[in-house]
Amino acid sequence: MANFYIFPLLLEARSDHFYEGNEYIKYLSHRIHGLRKSLHITQRGGKPKSSVDKRYAEILLFNADRAFQQFVFLRSSQRRHALRRLKRADQFGKELVSFTNAFDCNDHIFYLEAIAFAKYIEGTLNYEKRDWEGSLSAFSISRLSFLVLQNKIDTLAEHEKSVLGELQNQIDSNLRYVAQRTGLQNQTKSLDILMLSSIPKDEEVIQHVNSVDSEILQMTGDEQDSLQTITVIEWRDQRVKIEHPDVVLALYAIHDVKNSPGTIDSKRDRLLAAWARAEEITKSVLDNTGLEDEQKFQTLSICYTYLAYNVVLLRIQRDLAVENDSELVASQAQLRSRQSLYDSIIKNIEIAKELPGIARDTGMTAQLEAQISLAKSKRCQAIADAYQAQDKLASLAMCVRAASYLQQVNDILRNFEEKPHLIAFDIIPELKKDEKELKKKILLLQSLASMGNINQPPKNLSLVETLDSYQTLAELEPSWNLTDADIRAIPAKPLFFDLAITYLGQQTSFDKKKAQPEKPVTSVSKEPKQKNKGFFSSLLGR
Amino acid sequence: MSNHEEEIEELAQRIGKIEVGDTKSDIYQKVLNLIDIERYEHALKIIEKYLGETDAVYERAYCAFQLGKEDFSLEDKQFLQHLQAQKAYRLSDFSKALKIYEHLENDLPEQRADIRVNMLAAASQLPGLQLNNAVSLDDQDSVFNLATRYLTIGDWNQAIELLSSSLEKLENSDSNSEDHKSQINLCRLQLFFAYLQAGDNEKASKESLKISKDCLDETSQAIFVNNLISMSIDNPYISFRDLHGTNLEKALSSLLASQKKQFIRNLALLDMAVGKQRSVRKEKKRNPEESIYFSTILLREETKSLISPKKLPGYLENLFKSDSDNIVVALLLMQHKISNGNFRGALSIYQKLRTSLEASQSLSVLYSPGLVGLGDALHYKIQSTGFKSQLLHEAANYWRKQQSCEAKLLLCTRSLLAHLDERAPVSTIQDDMSVIDDLLQWKGPISELVSCKVAALCYLDKEIESGMDKYLVPTKDLITGIDVDDIEIRGVPVSAAIGPIKRSVEANSSNSSKKTRKRRKPTPKSFNPKATPDPQRWIPKRDRTNVKIKSKGKSMQGGVA
């Protein structure tokens, strides 16, 4: 990271050494001790306990993080002890902020890093103490700092992205929850507006943010209008408005993830988690809702179908994205991976078909069936690619099966009037593309298999009998007969008619010249033949 | 000359004798009779001597054609096409014959049925050709030719089924003419052959007993005796007598090229069986294209009779050293090494032979399809991973520069397919395609060449003409017998884990070798297995009833003074 100091340390520690249980806490203790030794501040009783070196910030950071992790470790069993550790973490965080401000008041990045972490801990402390106003303010400052720093980060490793993503996600979810607790007006605000409105104007962090990125403070309420539609769900031809607070909160969480900084690929997992959580919350609410309130039940049912469908959709898209990122070399392992992908897609779409409200929806059912057939066709094509090198007939059979699945897709879509949805595949262009490629592949395999079927050398013949035929190892190997010859049977000739002979014997009229008879043979012509006979011929009687 | 030939000659002399007072019509009839007994030269002489130039023009052309003369002229193109088709068929140029008959079929609708029989006869010798028209199963001649085609492509069961049904229909008919009997026996002869090829010698033997030899023509009689000998050759001298009792000269002159070659080989083997090596040597000089075959059987007989089995490899190696470009010696030596499982030794012999043939510029022999296939097979046997058909590509490069021939057709097509499997560059495939185009011009659109071209065009992602797919084997026929559902369920195949199994076996063997065997204690010499053991043998000796313990005496040495 460019010009960053605190975040690399924190991300490195959490990503590389975050072990199970309290092992991370032990690691931090060892590291803090090492830092103290290096700064010569280990002794007590008259010895200095602080240092002006920049590395002292590491000690404060890890002290705060260690205390925070102890809070996380203890909060399920010893709440009061956990709160004391959290308070201690907050104290260390404040000391960190003071140190950064005293070290270099012009290093805004350094200050923002410290304030982001410290305010996150303070917000958690206020959250635990049910101080919603204080928690809202602290989380807002932390989120603002993170947003400013987010624009300054050039590159991150994958594991560092996940750690930072968890922090951001936790801050966003906490902020949304706290906003809900503070009132309905805050609940319907976007996170950005909520964040800016919760930060006091005289806060010191505003000055640092203005120095780094003043535009981020100029966020307006343009996004506020789009928030009104978050709670309005359109599923097929039905439009419902969700009013249940838990479901509304879940929907806002989805929106927050969508609008969070980063690319679609980087926040895909977070988005899927948000959708899955919303589905789970809706299902639990739906289960607790009785049939007395039919309108509410109907609304929640539609919402649940919408959420569950989108979960399946995102899961499929995630699988496709992961598969597309992998190498394109058509190895056996890669083909098995492709097959697994298509199996997963088929399974997910089968789950979507069984969702309430979809089974009776003929249009949606037809689309899903078409998607399943297309996925099966692609699966067969993957199997055909695997068999192409070793068994061309099996490969051809799989291609023919894939073509039959494509025919099923065509049959389903022939009577389909509405525009197909983009589920796993954009079905119409994908269908055209697959049909073209599959036709060519079938023709290629048919020609290759035809070659294998044509002019096969006779079996059980030796090499000297088939020198004019090319025999492969598969044909030579059973016997390896090179020179053993035997009397072979011969088939009868095929029936072949002499059709030219049918033209003979058709003449009925001849020239008028008379036929001359053959002269009689005289005895003189026989004498030269007798003279040519030799002694042995005459002796043998020839 | 045999007696049969003498009788025919006497008959020809009698028929061809022109009497005083014979009219031209009578002479014309005599000419037709001479043509019936295939005395074309005599008939042609009579036509030229006694008939005018405008008389018997078809008969004149027909006799000239049968005698191999090309100086006749005739305006009837269809008659000439018939003659050309017959010539092509006789010379085993079946694709050309088919092409001519395709034109005649459209021009002569009244002869369509007979033309289709002839087309099917030519198609039966072209296994790669797809039959466009459906064959009528009511026409017994077409059914016979279709069964012959199935025999050519190796589909024995289908051929047996067709021939059996045809034979049943023929036997159920009421006709009792000589032609009908001949047709029945010809069908049985083909069924006899089909059973032999299918490996069912019992049914073949039963079918052979039903065949009436006298109802067959001379060529079929020779084939029948040959097939009987191939089934079992108990006494070679009797077999020799039986086969030479038929009209071999007539049979050899009327058989197809491939059948004639096999027949000559069979005759040579039979001569070797009765000890007539001199006849085989004469035949070797007469047929130089079969010299490798004749040399092989001669050398095998020589080594079998002169050399003991132990000295055979040394003898062959000495022969090969002295004459390293001798294919026959090399093949025998390779056969011996392969029989002992020494594939590396066989490959070494092959490479030496290859070097010698290259030095002697015998490239057409070196790059013959059989030798190329053998070399690639040996290389693949030794080096299975990363194997490429190097010899095949070298042979294809050699034949590419030669004139079109069967070897070029066979190897260049295989080389193209190998390049496709190896994912060769586009330029290589395009070069191969140019060779395929040359072969297409020479041979015509046979399935083998069209399949290669279609495969190459698909690989190059180019447009394919609409009429090309009819030359391919139908997809339904190709995937018949394949369990598609099973393949789909199993998915992408996984290679078997051979290594761990071998390692586990080795581990077990190593463990077993480390174990020390416990030595059994030797059996006492007084042990008698038949004797009943003492029932009190495990009771302490002092407590046994059958043991008397000696008591200590009371007397003691030294008394009290």
Image (spheres, helix red, strand yellow):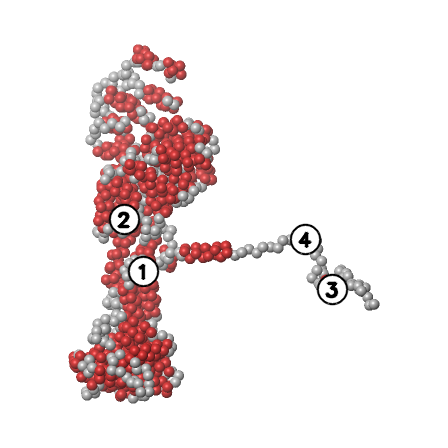
Q: Measured from the top left, where is residue B127 in percent x and y? A: 32, 42
CB contact under 8 Å: marks 2 and 1: no
Q: Return the chain for callout 2.
A: B
Q: Residues within 10 Å of mark 4 (few under 14, many from 20)?
A: few
Task: Indicate the amino acid at tag 2.
Answer: His
Calculate the distance from the C-alpha at mark 4 to the C-alpha at mark 1. Answer: 73 Å
Q: Return the chain for callout 4.
A: B
Query: From the viewer's perspective, is the residue at label 4 or at label 1 nearer?
Result: 4
Secondary element at tag 1: helix
Question: Between B274 and A377, which is closer to the camera in this rendering?
Answer: B274
Q: Identify residue for label 4.
A: B527
Calculate the distance from the C-alpha at mark 2 to the C-alpha at mark 1. Answer: 23 Å
Checking the image for residue A334, the label placed there is: 1
Q: Measured from the top left, where is residue A244 in percent x and y? A: 30, 82
**Quarter assignment of residue A72:** bottom left
A410 is higher (above) or lower (below) than A15: above
Quadrant of the snapshot with the C terminus of chain A: top left
Residue at point 25%, 49% (across, down): B456
Secondary element at tag 4: loop
B39 is higher (above) or lower (below) than A189: above
Q: Residues within 10 Å of mark 2 (few under 14, many from 20)?
A: many
Checking the image for residue B543, the label placed there is: 3
Checking the image for residue B419, the label placed there is: 2
**Quarter assignment of residue B34:** top left
Q: Are marks 3 and 4 on the same chain?
A: yes
Task: Indicate the amino acid at tag 3.
Answer: Asp
**Upstream in sequence: badge 3 or badge 4:** 4
From this viewpoint, which residue is outermost toward the front?
B561
Task: Indicate the amino acid at tag 4.
Answer: Phe
Q: Are marks 2 and 3 on the same chain?
A: yes
Query: From the viewer's perspective, is the residue at label 2 or at label 3 nearer?
Result: 3
CB contact under 8 Å: marks 4 and 1: no
